[in-house]
Amino acid sequence: MDDLSRRKMFLVGGGAALGALGMLGAASANALPRAGTDPKWVWDPEADPVAAKILDRGEVQQVNAALWNWTRNDQPVPDGLPGYVRDFVEYARRMPSWADSRKLEIAAEFNKSRGLYLNLLNGLGGGMLSTAIPKEARAVYYSKGGADMEDRVAKTSILGFAVGSLNAYRPDGSCVVEAVKTRLVHAAVRHLLPQSPHWNGDIPISQNDMLVTWHTLPTYAMRKMLEWKVSIKPADSEAYLHVWQVTAHLLGIRDEYIPADWAAANAQSDQVLPPNMGPTREGVELTDILLGQLAEQTSPGSISRPLCNAFARYLVGDQVSDWDQIRREPIWGPAIKAAWPALVAFREGLLPLPLVPEAAWAIDEAARRYILFYLTKGKETKIEIPDMNRP
């Protein structure tokens, strides 16, 4: 049985009740996978039929237009959505019952003081890891976003910056909104990509695929910060994991698959990342585009690309860098390897001083805004449901 047939059988067996989305809250319990179900064969039986219906009915433009100005967590679901989409969004935006507002506030304060590390690790480091994940690299390359990587990176950054913002899950934040929109984008890609002549027939973005990507973000970032001897209190570490646990839930990852603590996260990462990584032509091309963009953002000129190459190689190591064909830089490579630990130690020594965390956050926030401005060419950009594959 091929992957498409397996997925259709799963959706019919586990998610047929979702046809009446007015009953979504009750139906979703039946759609959840049983404990022990292999996440490779679980997708998103709640979002997938919604996105497929939007695409098959030709309602993508209508839905994107209605969601365009939906930007805050506390905003009502906007008018103009088809009823079945509105029902799904109302359901999908609910915070999980286990979300802890105190931990989310602690995570925001942690992001304030450690934003420099987190932006580098989640942006540059996570980006280089993702291009070395064959299924993810191909899914990005052959979906609509692969044709305009500046726009694709800008839209990915919108969600990443929302998670790391001080008001991520407060009423005036946007993390719930961006996660729900991203969940619909993933579902649309699952529907569209198998129709591409360049795709190999596997259904993309399974629960397992989402877990693989998830571990290139919080798990990878925490491991690197500990490797760099960043001083992290247990409460901060737990809170940082929690903000990503909540985000995983809102992206459609099933609670049974979300690691409960760092020991579980590290173990799961070791289980799912290594067998899903390797080189691809698409990944190499995406890496070159991403590093070229970063070099342009930093300082146009001959020095910037070698520096970006060296720092990327420092962040992800030689094996991933070789898969991504990131050049070795004989001058910048040793320089970064020697200087970065000293810079981290210096920065950590300053953080306890008055006003330093606030100043650090202001600098990091300015950098984020500049990156988004550069990627979007100053135009307002939102996460939108795609209506086609890469042309």
Image (cartoon, rainbow, N blue to C red):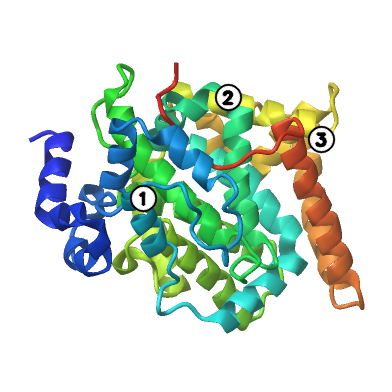
Q: Name the residue under label 1.
A: 85
Q: Position of residue 104 (x, y in %)?
A: 59, 75
Drawn side of residue 390 relative to residue 257, left or right: right
Q: Mark 3 points at which residue?
A: 298
In the rendered image, the vertical position of residue 299 relative to residue 213, given as above or below? above
Drawn side of residue 166 relative to residue 274, left or right: right
Q: Where is residue 212 in the image (x, y as percent from the top left)?
A: 40, 50
Q: Between residues 125 and 247, which one lies in front from this camera angle?
A: 247
**Label 3 sits on what residue type?**
Thr
Question: Residue at (32%, 63%) from the top-left corner?
Answer: 254
The quarter of the displayed image where residue 96 is located: bottom left
Q: How many labels does the image show?
A: 3
Eye-nearest disc, 1 or 3: 1
Q: Where is residue 87 in the image (x, y as percent from the top left)?
A: 34, 58
Distance between mark 1 and mark 2 Cα atoms: 27 Å
Please report whichever mark, 1 or 2, sits nearer to the chain's N-terminal start. 1
Query: What kind of element bears circle 2?
Result: loop
In the rendered image, the vertical position of residue 148 relative to residue 319, given as above or below? above
Label 2 neighbourhood size at 10 Å, few (<14), some (14-19), many (20+)? few
**Label 2 sits on what residue type?**
Asp
Label 3 neighbourhood size at 10 Å, few (<14), some (14-19), many (20+)? some
